[in-house]
Image (cartoon, coloured by chain):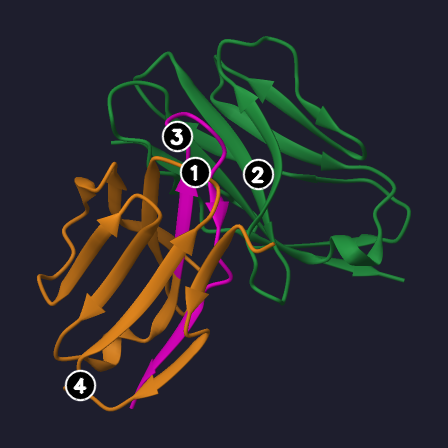
Chain colours: A green, B orange
């Protein structure tokens, strides 16, 4: 079974600075997807960024980028120029690309605080 | 337009009661899911349906019964509610390998 580990329960960053959230995962599969979701206090789950395992290029979405290290099974999220609205719980998630099991397996989350 | 909607958003009830949470998606997706987020914010899959057929049942107590009357709806019925059922329940939908879109969540409180 796949597992996702987020080793930082809480992180904080100053507004306008950069922060990196860590995620590692365990799988025996070679084909899969990785995601970062954001959950603000409103509790809505919002997709931040997605990475296909077969792609070597790291995904980027504006101020959000990932460092995907497939051999190390590491998938960190970098937030540049942090804004107050980035404050939220961030979840790393794994999904298989094979078979019919398309569930997301989540890490326990990292609570990000942005200080003004 | 709301993509994935859930009703109700809040549900407070007594132990032993039976309750239902409804979910509807207007995205034309084939696959729908129920996730449970516990008090420590941990999210875990409960069920997945594809074209009205059950695909995933992650060792959920049989007091929980999902029902999918059509591709756009996946309801969750819970019998004999227990204190430990208190959580936020999220519905989500996707195309087969597409992004999962989440509903706003239903906060269930069992007293």
Mark 1 crowd level (few <14, some 14–19, many ≥20, 10 Å Cα): few
Chain holding disc 1 = B
Labels 3 and 4 in the same subunit: no
Query: Closer to the observer: label 4 or label 2?
Result: 4
Measure how far apart labels 2 and 1 are at the Cα level.
24 Å
Chain holding disc 4 = B
Labels 4 and 2 in the same subunit: no
Q: Where is mark 3, residue-wise? A: A95
Chain holding disc 2 = A
Q: Residue at x 26, y 47 (%)?
A: B70
Picture quarter with the C terminus of chain A: bottom right
Mark 3 crowd level (few <14, some 14–19, many ≥20, 10 Å Cα): some
Q: Where is mark 4, residue-wise? A: B17
Q: Where is mark 1, residue-wise? A: B28
Q: Residue at x 56, y 10 (%)?
A: A55
Mark 4 crowd level (few <14, some 14–19, many ≥20, 10 Å Cα): few
Query: Closer to the observer: label 3 or label 1?
Result: 1
Q: Secondary structure at mark 3?
A: strand
Measure how far apart labels 4 and 2 are at the Cα level.
36 Å
Q: Where is mark 2, residue-wise? A: A36
Closer to the N terminus: mark 4 or mark 1?
4
């Amino acid at each position: 079974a796949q597992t996702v580990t987020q080793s930082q329960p809480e992180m904080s960053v100053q507004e306008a600075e950069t922060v990196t959230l860590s995620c590692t995962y365990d799988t025996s599969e070679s084909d899969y997807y990785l995601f970062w979701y954001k959950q603000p206090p409103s509790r809505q789950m919002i997709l931040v960024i997605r990475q296909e395992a077969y792609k070597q290029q790291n995904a980027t979405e504006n101020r959000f980028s990932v460092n995907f290290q497939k051999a190390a099974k590491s998938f960190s999220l970098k937030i540049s120029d942090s804004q107050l609205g980035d404050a939220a719980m961030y979840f790393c998630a794994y999904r298989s690309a094979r078979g019919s099991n398309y569930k997301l397996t989540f890490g326990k989350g990292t609570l990000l605080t942005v200080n003004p | 337009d709301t993509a994935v909607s859930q009703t109700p958003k809040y549900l407070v009830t007594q132990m032993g009661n039976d309750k239902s949470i409804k979910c509807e998606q207007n995205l034309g997706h084939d696959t729908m899911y129920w996730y449970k987020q516990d008090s420590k914010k941990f999210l875990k899959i409960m069920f997945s349906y594809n074209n009205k057929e059950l695909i995933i049942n992650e060792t959920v107590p049989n007091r929980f019964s999902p029902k999918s009357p059509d591709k756009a709806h996946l309801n969750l019925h819970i019998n004999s509610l227990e204190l430990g059922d208190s959580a936020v329940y999220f519905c989500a939908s996707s195309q087969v390998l597409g992004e999962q879109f989440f509903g706003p969540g239903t906060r269930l409180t069992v007293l």
